[in-house]
Image: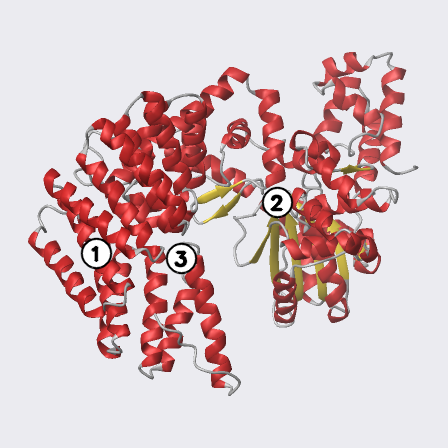
């Protein structure tokens, strides 16, 4: 250890004992902590910086020769710690590489770009995402293009005392063979200029690994030459200018399984594909976690993959289980967490209370009690530290970081405070859901002028965006309120979201939402609310889940509850939904009977919205029965009723009904093979979909329009409609999207002469 770090620790202990000082005594005289001195003497930490050595020398009352001796030992220890590593001998484990095809392609492109000018790539991301591995894998792939050298320099950014830029400059210069006499001639003040000069003449690949911050990296970035510099850091290094950026998160599921298989062996992986997929999922597809899990299995040949999957299934013990030897996933998270400011650390812990996969800044502010702008600043600190991912205005914790945050929450926050924070978040979610949902409710609309919220609900569109973005969170809050017996707010939320549900038909949870409303009404002993919510459940089963037969049960229960309440309107809606279900089941006699009953009840109650829907439903029944001319007449009656009652019908209801009437007329005209007229009506329906932002109904109209266009011989336009349908995104009807894909395939086959026409009728 002569000349190395160990020499410093031994010398410090020798000098302390020579003065009969305890560690505590030296701590008192030098101002250095007892733990810090003990770690230095036992070689448990990096050699100290000059200011620390000076404080120890003062505390020991060293004379000048002894002081210089201690400083020399510290310098020797530091310089021995920061040697670059040639990429021809980089660390083990890089061979086990999977995925990152996009990133590798970009790095190869930037390597070529660096032939003409210096290029800098900043690679950041979640702890354990494989930033160093990606850099080293890239270095191997492109090494032949850098004949003047390929260097890896560990910047030790997560250490308490990382090397300074000046030290790193000397390290690189020495690695590149710069003679000591040139270093001495330039002197410390001239090393930076010498560094720039040496690199300007090289075709060099420089990997600066584990950077602490911009200040440490900036002096090391070449200003000239054919140099590719790849900087890896847990931080995003936002302050660096003129650099290419790569952010690494988790691997895709297929790549995650491939990485596991490469570590445990392909035969073993192929024998238990389901278990392997479960392990990958429970590792959050995070490369470090996957490597730990893979190494665990590779060294325990008696274990099945399923056994490890079951071990990882226990969330409260998952992070403890993800350790192999001296490698622990939680330790990688510790390094980033310990560098946070107290406010950011608290925010990080409290984000574990978010029930859904992500949150907005307003939700985070409710957790911490900060104002919105301060909360955004704190969230961005977490993003910069690599502990929080973003997607637009949404913030997301990786699954394993969420477990880590939960553990820190239990350690640092009193249980009572945690529960109060959760309750405050859930209360805010439900209250905001009510206000947002009421934009779509007749006789409500915008929040009251007295409302002072942190969410922009200035329009129905903004309200829809919030409800959809926070759907998983407010649904969890609704479930919690129901489980806690808070029935009144549950019923209020379910009622407020009734008309909004038309905007998000295929979300997948409306039957549950309204089912919770039913249970709340039953607990409150309110038969009218019970009937209302049961009718909403029937609607969800009919339209959202395509289960008309099952919907007849809540419809019948709704009728009984409405009769107990003596409410004509909910009795009418029960008949309306029953008629709808029987129409879909092809039972038209029953359908017409229920719709006629509903129309009579709505008329007695003077409910213009209900009467409008029975008129529309009757038109749909004519169309479903193949009575196209009668259907067209009935749809025209529906449109006439909209015009006659324009001042009494809520705009959202009018838009949905108008859309349905034009689309229904298009379908009826298609039955009559009046293709051009059908196309015109479907296009009008699509215009209304666009105005509403309703992708669920848009997907339906696009497939119907495509059929009409194809039948009219307008094949290119038909194909364009199908392509548009496939690209609508998650709000579209999944059955319609699947149908569009199938019909595109048929059109392609027909175009190649291998198949027939795709049209199979509307």
Residue 20, position as x, y percentages in the image: 87, 11
For the residues labelled 3 and 1, the Cα–Cα distance comes to 26 Å
Residue at the spot x=54%, y=43% of the render? 384
Residue occupied by mark 1:
618
Left or right of 658? Residue 265 is right
Mark 3 surroundings: few (<14), some (14-19) or many (≥20) residues within 10 A: many
Residue 366, position as x, y percentages in the image: 41, 29
User: 596 or 9, which lies in front?
Assistant: 596
Mark 1 surroundings: few (<14), some (14-19) or many (≥20) residues within 10 A: many
Residue occupied by mark 2:
126
Residue occupied by mark 3:
732
Q: How many marks?
A: 3
Residue 685, position as x, y percentages in the image: 25, 64
Look at the numbered disc 3 and give the secondary structure of its residue: loop
Q: Is residue 373 above or below residue 278?
A: above
Work out which quarter of the rendered image holds the N terminus and state it.
top right
**Label whose residue precedes the other's in the sequence (3 or 2):** 2
Its colouring scheme is secondary structure
* Of marks 2 and 1, the one in the foreground: 1
* Of marks 3 and 2, the one in the foreground: 3
- Residue 491 seen in render: yes
Q: Residue furthest left?
A: 644
Work out which quarter of the rendered image holds the C terminus and state it.
bottom left
* Quarter of image, res 47: top right
């Amino acid at each position: 250890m002569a000349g190395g770090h160990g020499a410093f620790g031994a010398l410090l202990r020798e000098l302390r004992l020579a003065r009969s000082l305890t560690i505590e005594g030296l701590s008192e005289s030098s101002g250095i902590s007892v733990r810090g001195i003990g770690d230095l003497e036992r070689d448990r930490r990096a050699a100290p910086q000059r200011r620390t050595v000076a404080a120890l020398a003062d505390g020991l009352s060293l004379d000048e020769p002894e002081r210089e001796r201690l400083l020399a030992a510290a310098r020797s220890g530091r310089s021995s710690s920061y040697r670059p590593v040639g990429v021809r001998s980089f660390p083990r484990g890089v061979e086990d590489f999977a995925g990152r095809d996009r990133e590798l392609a970009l790095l190869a492109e930037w390597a070529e770009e660096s032939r003409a000018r210096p290029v800098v790539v900043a690679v950041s991301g979640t702890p354990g995402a494989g930033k160093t591995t990606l850099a080293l894998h890239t270095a191997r792939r492109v090494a032949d293009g850098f004949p003047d050298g390929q260097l890896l320099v560990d910047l030790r950014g997560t250490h308490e005392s990382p090397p300074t830029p000046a030290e790193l400059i000397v390290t690189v210069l020495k690695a590149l063979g710069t003679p000591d006499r040139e270093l001495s001639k330039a002197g410390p003040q001239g090393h930076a200029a010498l560094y720039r000069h040496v690199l300007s003449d090289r075709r060099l690949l420089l990997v600066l690994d584990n950077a602490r911050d911009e200040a440490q990296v900036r002096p090391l970035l070449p200003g000239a030459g054919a140099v590719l510099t790849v900087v890896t850091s847990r931080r995003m290094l936002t302050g660096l200018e003129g650099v290419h950026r790569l952010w690494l998160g988790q691997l895709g599921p297929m790549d995650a399984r491939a990485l596991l298989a490469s570590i445990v062996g392909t035969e073993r992986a192929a024998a238990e594909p389901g278990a392997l997929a479960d392990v990958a999922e429970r590792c959050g597809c995070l490369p470090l976690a996957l490597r730990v899990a893979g190494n665990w299995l590779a060294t325990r040949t008696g274990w099945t993959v399923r056994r490890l999957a079951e071990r990882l299934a226990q969330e409260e013990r998952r992070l403890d289980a993800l350790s192999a030897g001296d490698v622990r996933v939680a330790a990688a998270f510790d390094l980033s967490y310990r560098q946070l400011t107290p406010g950011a650390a608290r925010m990080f812990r409290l984000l574990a209370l978010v029930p859904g996969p992500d949150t907005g800044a307003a939700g985070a502010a409710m957790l911490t009690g900060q104002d919105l702008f301060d909360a955004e600043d704190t969230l961005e600190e977490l993003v910069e530290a690599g502990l929080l991912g973003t997607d637009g205005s949404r913030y997301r914790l990786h699954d394993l970081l969420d477990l880590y945050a939960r553990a820190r929450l239990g350690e640092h926050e009193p249980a009572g405070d945690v529960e109060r924070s959760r309750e405050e978040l859930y209360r805010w979610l439900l209250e905001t859901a009510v206000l947002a949902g009421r934009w779509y409710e007749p006789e409500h609309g915008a929040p009251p002028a007295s409302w002072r919220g942190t969410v922009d609900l200035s329009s129905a569109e903004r309200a829809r965006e919030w409800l959809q973005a926070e759907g998983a969170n407010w649904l969890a809050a609704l479930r919690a309120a129901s489980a806690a017996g808070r029935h009144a707010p549950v019923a209020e939320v379910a009622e407020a979201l009734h008309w909004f549900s038309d905007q998000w038909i295929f979300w997948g949870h409306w039957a549950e939402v309204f089912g919770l409303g039913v249970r709340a009404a039953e607990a409150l002993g309110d038969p009218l609310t019970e009937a209302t919510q049961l009718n909403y459940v029937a609607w969800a089963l009919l339209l959202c889940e395509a289960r008309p037969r099952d919907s007849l049960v809540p419809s019948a229960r709704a009728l009984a509850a409405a009769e107990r309440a003596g409410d004509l309107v909910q009795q009418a809606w029960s008949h309306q939904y029953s008629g709808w279900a029987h129409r879909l089941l092809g039972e038209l006699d029953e359908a017409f009977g229920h719709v006629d009953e509903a129309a009579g009840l709505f008329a007695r109650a003077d409910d213009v919205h209900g009467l409008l829907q029975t008129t529309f439903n009757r038109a749909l029944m004519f169309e479903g029965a193949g009575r196209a001319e009668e259907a067209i007449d009935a749809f025209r009656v529906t449109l006439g009723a909209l015009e006659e009652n324009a001042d009494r019908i809520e705009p959202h209801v009018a838009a949905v009904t108008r859309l349905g009437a034009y689309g229904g007329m298009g379908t009826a005209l298609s039955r009559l093979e009046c293709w051009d007229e059908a196309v015109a009506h479907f296009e009008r329906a699509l215009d209304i979909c666009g105005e509403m932002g309703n992708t669920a109904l848009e997907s339906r109209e696009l497939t119907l329009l495509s059929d009409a266009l194809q039948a009219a011989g307008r094949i290119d336009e038909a194909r364009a409609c199908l392509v548009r349908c496939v690209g609508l995104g998650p709000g579209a009807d999944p059955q319609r999207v699947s149908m569009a894909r199938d019909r595109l395939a048929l059109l392609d086959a027909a175009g190649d002469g291998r198949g027939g026409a795709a049209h199979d009728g509307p």
